[in-house]
Amino acid sequence: MVSFAPLLALCLVLAAETVTALVLPGARTVGKVGRVSAGPIEISALGCGTWSWGNRLLWDYDPSQDEEIYRAYREIRDAGVTIFDTGDSYGTLDLNGRAEILLGQFERRYLQEKSDNSKSMFGIGTFVENASNKQQVATKLAPYPWRLRRGSLVKAAKESLKRLEQDKLAIAQTHWSTANYNVFQEGALWEGLGDIFDEGLCEAVGVSNYGPIQLEKFSNRMKERNVPIAVAQVQYSLMTARNDEIMDACEDAGCRLISYSPLCLGLLTGKYNLDNLPREGNPRRQLFRELLPGAQPLLGTLNAVAKDVGKTQSQVAINWAISKGTVPIPGARNLAQAQENLGAVGWKLSNAAVQELDNASAGVKKKMIENIFQTR
């Protein structure tokens, strides 16, 4: 049987899920969702990933879905979610950059609706947004082969801002490291991120798919340039191999770990089994066929814990990621998904439940495939 794992791994390069959160220790609360430190800035304790906004291959996106996506967006914004993870490569073929376009459009519409509601209720025509609830866009800039010079990354950031119709990013990130295949390009990427900050185009910088060794090198260079690091993100869920070294590296760098794909592309939701897989032609179909048999003990434990605490499997999986000190970023494409993710907020798994899930996770023989550009 031909494995689709390599194709899925490549797709994961252009990935990151995201939506709502539990209040972490020391966090402040805005709406339902708390706020935590991320380097020099504060972000919501759970974010929203926008990978699926424009992705036809894995998520069957169609522009006709935009209104329903907006309803999800409005729901999570009302709950206090501010950090939105996106990328300039998000969107399939002719829809490239679609996620950034939608983020800009949605926020303008959201603020206009708030202003209109304020006027109708109080006769005041302008809605004054609370600074702690301001939208924060964290864009990942793809290290395409033609982006060989530091200026090309600055240009990419400006193009992202143009799609967003905004003046400044909260966080500018490199989407993956080229250290495994083009060391010289890696250096240009780092300098480009620093230049983006120096030009006032972002509040802080970050990285994606960096391991502890590469993150330390990046951190050292940014310290030399006095460029603040806000986040580092890796694929992190009950289905991924544990690596506490990246947590230690984030602490040393003074940044927050973002956990993308906290639901393992939907496998941890309980929705799928061998008789109910993603549609034919979707790379997740073969991946789930390979992963589900070995994941049954974990899924059984996840289901048992969910019943015990009166939550869904998705909510427990997200809450577990939060309990590790990460900011998970599950995605939401409709109101039901947004509300489901928000159900992970405002409560906390017991230490015993976390340990039970840790043990079940460690027992999974076939883990989720690692992103092919993940470095050490």
Image (cartoon, rainbow, N blue to C red):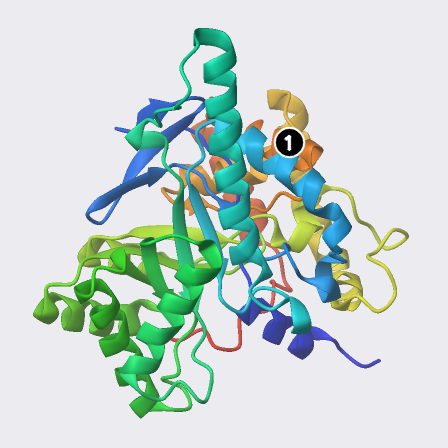
- Res. 204 image quadrant: bottom left
In this view, the residue farthest toward the top is: 122
Residue type indicated by callout 1: Glu
| Residue at (33% x, 40% y) in the render | 43
Question: Where residue 209 sits: x, y (%)?
Answer: 42, 68
| Residue at (64% x, 34% y) in the render | 71
Question: Where residue 274 sits: x, y (%)?
Answer: 86, 55
Image mark count: 1
Label 1: element kind: helix
Question: Where residue 258 sits: x, y (%)?
Answer: 40, 51
Of the 4 image quadrants, the one containing the C terminus is bottom left
Q: Which residue is mark 1?
A: 340
- Res. 288 image quadrant: bottom right
Report whether 203 appears left or right of 261: left
Report whether 62 appears left or right of 274: left
| Residue at (54% x, 56% y) in the render | 101
234 or 166, nearer to the observer: 166
